[in-house]
Image (spheres, rainbow, N blue to C red):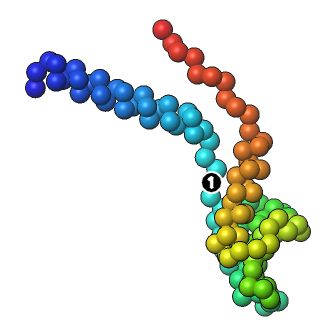
Amino acid sequence: MNDITQLSTLYSNAIARAEKAEEELRTGVKVKPLEWRDGRDDKTVFAVFQIAVILGADNLEGLDYAVIGPDRHDLYEVVLGNRIIRSRGTEADAKAAAQADFDQRILSALVSPPPVRETP
């Protein structure tokens, strides 16, 4: 490999790494996906009752999302604590709505990091 080819390869690799780092800074923080589990018990009347507990707060009332349904119109509800946050669509739509609500709540509590300073 000659010197020009070597320099070209090093330059291309450096550009690729810089673009990847820039993309990571631009996209910012990622929110962990909710983990769903079956929440049915012997009192459950719905065919689907999925629960995603927030931040490992298994024993704290109101800190979980529940997807329940289908209702008589074949629709699903998303419940956070004791509040319905969405009522329509499929089970997948309801889980996506719960994730979007969770993402928005987490991201709204964060502050933007200070700009990255270039070091000489």
Q: Residue furthest right?
A: 82
Q: Residue furthest top?
A: 120
Residue at the (62%, 58%) spot, across then down: 33
Q: Quadrant of residue 43?
A: bottom right
> Looking at the image, which is closer to me, 37 or 91?
91
Q: Is residue 22 left or right of residue 56?
A: left
Q: 109 above or below 48?
A: above
Which kind of residue does numbered mark 1 sit on? Lys
Residue 22 in sight: yes
Q: 20 above or below 31?
A: above
Residue 28 percent across, percent down from the top left: 60, 38
Residue 105 percent across, percent down from the top left: 77, 50
Q: Is residue 56 left or right of residue 63?
A: left
Residue 41 in sight: no
Residue at the (76%, 66%) spot, across then down: 65
Q: Which secondary structure lies at badge 1?
A: loop
Q: Which residue is mark 1?
A: 32
Q: Residue furthest left?
A: 1
Q: Characterize the local packing of mark 1: few (<14), some (14-19) or many (20 or more) Cα atoms within 10 angstroms.
A: few
Residue at the (37%, 32%) spot, across then down: 16
Residue at the (76%, 74%) spot, across then down: 88
Q: Quadrant of residue 62?
A: bottom right
Residue 24 percent across, percent down from the top left: 52, 37
Q: Is residue 45 left or right of residue 15?
A: right
Residue 27 percent across, percent down from the top left: 57, 39
Q: 34 above or below 23?
A: below
> Looking at the image, which is closer to me, 91 or 82?
91
> Looking at the image, which is closer to me, 104 or 120?
104
Q: Quadrant of residue 93?
A: bottom right
